[in-house]
Image: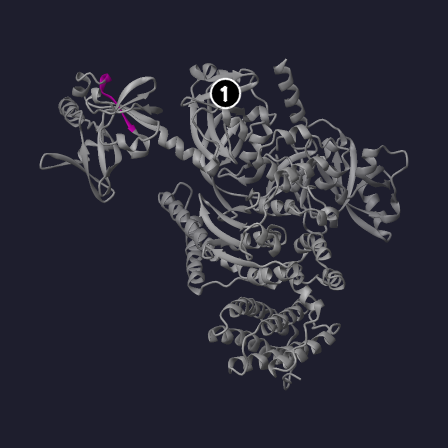
Amino acid sequence: MRSAELKEADAGDAVPICSLRVGNGLYGIETRQIREVLGTTVPRRVPLAPVYIAGVLPYRGEVLTTVSFRALLGLEKRDGANCVLVFDDEGNEERFGLIVDGVVGVIAVQQNALEANPSGLDARSQELFDGAYKLPSGLMVRLDPQRLRPSRLAESGLFGSESGPHGRLKQERQGEQR
Amino acid sequence: MGLKVVGQEPDKGDVEDLTKEFLAESQEGLERMELCLTQLEKKPDDEELVAEIFRAVHTIKGTTGFLGFGRLEKLAHAGESLLGALRDHRLAVSTELISGLLELMDGLRGILQTIEVTGTEGERTSDNDSALIARLLDLRDGGPVAKAAPASQNRAPFDKFSPGTSTNVAQCSSQSPSHDEVLSALPAAAPGVAMAAAPSMQDKTLRIDVDVLNRMMNLVGDLVLTRNQILRSKPGAENFPELARRLDSVTAELRESVMLARMQPVGYLFRKFPRLVRDLAATCGRQVRIEFEGQDTGLDKSLIEAVRDPLTHAVRNAVDHGIEPPQERIETGKPVEGVVRLRAYHQSGSIVIEVSDDGAGISTEHVLHMATERGLVTSEQAASMTQHEALQLVFVAGFSTAKQVTSISGRGMGMDVVRTNVERVGGSVELESQLGSGTTLRMRVPLTLAIVPALVVRSGGESFALPQNSLVELVYVPRHEAEQAVERMGTTELYRLRESLLPLVWLDRLLGLEHSADAEKHDFYIAVVESEGCRFGLVVDDLKAPEEIVVKPLSSELREIGVFSGATVLGNGTLALILDVAATGARAGVHPAEEGIVVDAKPAEDETARIEMENSMVIYETGEHMSSQGGDSGRMAMPLSAVERIESVPLSEIEYASGRAVLQYRGELLPLEDDGNVLRALAEAEATASVGDAQKDVRTATVLICLRPEAHGARRVGMVVRRVLDVSAGRLLAADAAASGEQLAIVKDRVTTVHRGFAQQAGKPRTAVLMEVA
């Protein structure tokens, strides 16, 4: 399958795409947008943070905020191996990590295989996805790291930026009062 | 024009380097010139100042020729010839002259900025140059002094705020230089522009003493050597501890010297303000004098940059809105000239920079009115706010918007920007104001950005770092006391700490971490913390070692949570979040107002600890014969403030000189007082023990190192006691004749004798150290 895709890529205007696995889905990000891929790491959880923030990691003398793609898709937490993709913002101001289940590999895909988001997509998916590549083996959803920036996710307000624990605490307190 | 280089054209890279160097040098020169000019206005006869200014302009002129900046050279030349006349006493210092020179400086600076941004001098405003040159020449020849073009005069202050990108601001103000317009342009444009502007050359360069640099280089050499040795040594090598120690000391020294190199006197920041205030006062029609204090206070370079904009903003506010117009000042009986005072000083591990004015002050009612109008607080909230709380509202984002600025007579414009900038570097801001007599803005910034001593605590299975500067004390609550220790008032949980009630905050519950249902069934620690007037007990599961942590900023989304001020990598390589104590308290609903339930502590934040100290007494036991005299089993007390340290001293170290026990303590000879004959008892015990026991039983005596107040100052004495019982709040009883001159106090509900000689130190109610005399 892979060789078939590669052959197709040779045909001309192709871009290298890093393909990722999250849950049962296949996703792809252009390799030039990825700064680094880190192996399995367990980020330090940040209490009270929005659910899609997986935690923080030490990275090159800085603290890297990581986004859990599983949480964005509404999937359950999963233990075991994972991968952290590190992205730089265009202005180099916001560096962040994206936690995925695993990296499959790098494939070259022709630009004309890309199709924009279909109109029937729900708001969350509309926000996260950047079209899909029609591969012979199936669809590979294209992701744009710029859309996955933590600040942008917070702005969109679609992903439960209201931190759960705080609400829970309030309820607890009210319960105590009664 | 300029020097023609014969032969090969200089390499492009070389020219670029030269230009960079020239820019940095010239900026510095202009900065000095600016300071000298404002001083010259006050001291017109100072030849040193004139020489300094001449040098700055001359250097620029000299270098420009070589680099081929013709426009700059022309202007500098005109300036130089004017200054030459001044130096040779052909001219006298006048306000016009100073204004002209300041304009020259602005002109030079403008061209320098253009060069920095575009690499060329630019041609667009060359007409302005010739007007300026003509004016300078007029000044030199003492000819008719053309009135300065209003445009350039008004532009001056704006240029200062928005280096490089000031065109819009300058244009809008030059077209309509009316007072109101100017004010509305200021807040709207300045903060944004100033924050957005790329740091200029000067912000990126730093002068370092070569000695410091050499020392750093030596240390780095040492570091490399140590690394080599470590790499070469086998695991478990014998000399490993020594290598580790060496690495530790080299790192510490290196860090210290880097910090030192980064330190700059705050005066560097203050330098530009005389000019700023001069221009601004003229624009606003105020008479303002600026005063400085503590310019030598050192501050990290990056922090200097960080507080530059907030400070500028604060000074501008003070002149714009703090100081009243002359007429108003006369009416209220104040001196016509207002004073803006900049003060920098150290306070408990941080640097405080104060901007105070003797102006109109801020009306809290007005602030509250505005805040309710904007929907920032409800009117009920507003009604229950203290004056201090109300004032802090001006820091809330959205308190004022550019549109309404002209109608506000208070401050608050862009104050949220001030706060954000200061907080970004781990500092805090507070505002104090007395209606009618002035306002003080206090910015508190840490000494250095990077490294903070902190205590690592565990809660809910995770590590958190607690900055030491907010930590007051630690209380361990053992398991069997855990249930009784926590008392409840409504939903608030409290702990009785030395007879005062301390609100408790369970960190794991606050952060929504998993905690065992019977959290109170195991032992825990209470970290008594205090910040911004809030004092509360933070309940944590365990304490880890205190560490010096390197603070790393969090991304903005995580900062928004508010509870964490940063993160750090701990010694074991894991990350720990740094708790923002004030925000934690606020989140848990602990307000400074709750201080009311604390019995003996006062809310004034810095005072609290001190008062606590004064009220505290060390309670101890002294020797047997005291107990036979009826003194409660030798229970005595001593004001805590008189006790410097409590030391455990091996008996062998106690020496006797002509029958009196003395101790060599930190290079001084300390006489020991042993009222209870503890030493003899200990010596006897040791003698009997050592007969049967070959193993040497090192007996130690507990010694309170006390400062005894005497007629000529204070003298240290050591007080030998059997054991120290407790530290507790106590109340002195009025000395009364019946008690045979003995000073008594009630400590822990029991009457206790206060050690003679120390009673007078116990003026107010105190806590005492209880001790037992054998």
Which residue is found at the position 68% from the left and 80% from the top? B134
Residue B22: image x %, image y %? 59, 72
Residue B305: image x %, image y %? 57, 55
**Camera-nearest residue between B57 and B646:** B57
Q: Is residue A127 magenta?
A: no
Q: Residue furthest top?
A: A178
Please state if B347 lies on the left or on the right of B718 as rendered. Answer: right
Question: Which residue range is magenta in the image?
Answer: B632-638
Whether residue B432 is visible: no
Q: Quarter of the image containing the N terminus of chain A?
A: top right
Q: Is residue B636 magenta?
A: yes
Whether B3 is drawn above or below B535: the answer is below
Residue B496: image x %, image y %? 44, 20
Whether B459 is drawn above or below B576: the answer is above
Q: Amino acid at mark 1?
A: Leu
Whether residue B767 is visible: yes
* Mark 1 surroundings within 10 Å by alpha-carbon count, few (fewer than 14), some (14 through 19), many (20 or more): some
Q: Residue furthest left?
A: B658
**Camera-nearest residue between B771 and B125:** B125
User: Which of the 4 image quadrants contains residue B177?
Assistant: bottom right
Whether B276 is drawn above or below B475: the answer is below
Residue A25: image x %, image y %? 79, 33
Q: Residue furthest bottom?
A: B6
Q: Which residue is mark 1?
A: B494
Which residue is found at the position 43% from the left and 52% from the top? B256
**Camera-nearest residue between B453 and B173:** B173
Please state if A152 lies on the left or on the right of B552 as rendered. Answer: right
Q: Secondary structure at mark 1?
A: strand
